[in-house]
Amino acid sequence: MSSSIKSHIDWNELFPLLPKAIRDSLLLEAVTLLSASTRKTRRSRRPLVGDNGSLNPQPNVQLPDSLRIWEESGDGYTLAAKGRHYRIISSKPPITKGEVKVFWEKLLDHKGDFVAYETILKMCGNHKKLAVNCVNYLWRTGRLEVAQGPEAKL
């Protein structure tokens, strides 16, 4: 009778054959090593489980590479700052997800084709970070254009 030697350990086959005390100590050691790791855990931008308990089948949406970058085509100042005015491009397709969607719908209800940064800040409930993120996203996707003021021509 010939016996063959495997070059690797198949833990799925070996682990259930071990005595319970050894299995428990191996599991405890594995959990201890994993919890002591300095590596950060990966966080998804959206929850894997929806509000109704079902799994979200759609992956995170990635922005296309052809979007504008303010550092390359801007005027040397920050995009979202006091005194800035923006022209609203309402002909763009609607935004379907995220907190920017709610903001974009509020902005479309805004009277006029132009909006000031201060108005955007008020619409975001004086949350500066949210206002800056919304302006940056809307500018990158071509929904806002920077203008000198409500009377300025682009």
Image (spheres, rainbow, N blue to C red):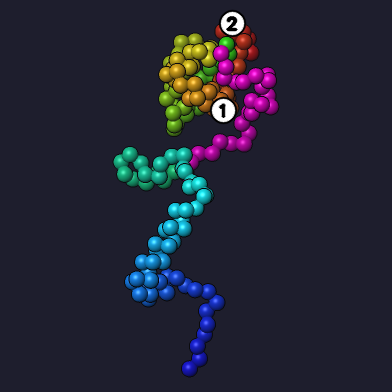
Question: Dots 2 and 1: beta carbons under 8 Å?
Answer: no
Percent position of residue 54, x then y: 33, 45
- Name the disc covering residue 141, or none: 1
Q: Quadrant of the C terminus?
A: top right
Determine whether the residue tagged by mark 2 lies in a helix, strand or loop: loop
Queried whether the magenta region covers residue 27, the answer comes back as: no
Q: Which residue is drawn at 68% across and 20% down?
A: 76
Label 1: which secondary element: loop
121 and 108: which one is in front?
121
- What's the mark number on residue 98? none
Query: Residue 151 got which mark?
Result: 2
Residue 134 visible in the snapshot: no
Q: Earlier in the sequence, mark 2 or mark 1?
A: 1
Q: Hey, which residue is sitting farthest left in the picture?
A: 52
Vertical position of residue 153 compared to residue 28: above or below: above
Is residue 62 visible in this depiction of the protein?
A: yes
Which percent across, then down, holds residue 122?
45, 15
Instruction: Tell me which amino acid carries mark 1.
Output: Thr
Return the x and y of residue 141 as percentages of the image width and height.
56, 28
User: Is residue 148 shown left or right of residue 111?
Assistant: right
In the picture shown, does residue 70 fall above or below 37? above
Q: What kind of residue is marked 2?
A: Glu
Residue 32 position (above or below residue 95): below
Most foreground residue, 96 or 85: 85
Question: Residue at (49%, 10%) from the top-left corner?
Answer: 112
- Point 47% across, 53% down: residue: 36
Residue that protrudes farthest toward the top in the picture: 151
Q: Give the range drawn in magenta.
A: 59-82
Q: Main secondary structure of the magenta part?
A: loop
Q: Does the magenta stretch include residue 71?
A: yes
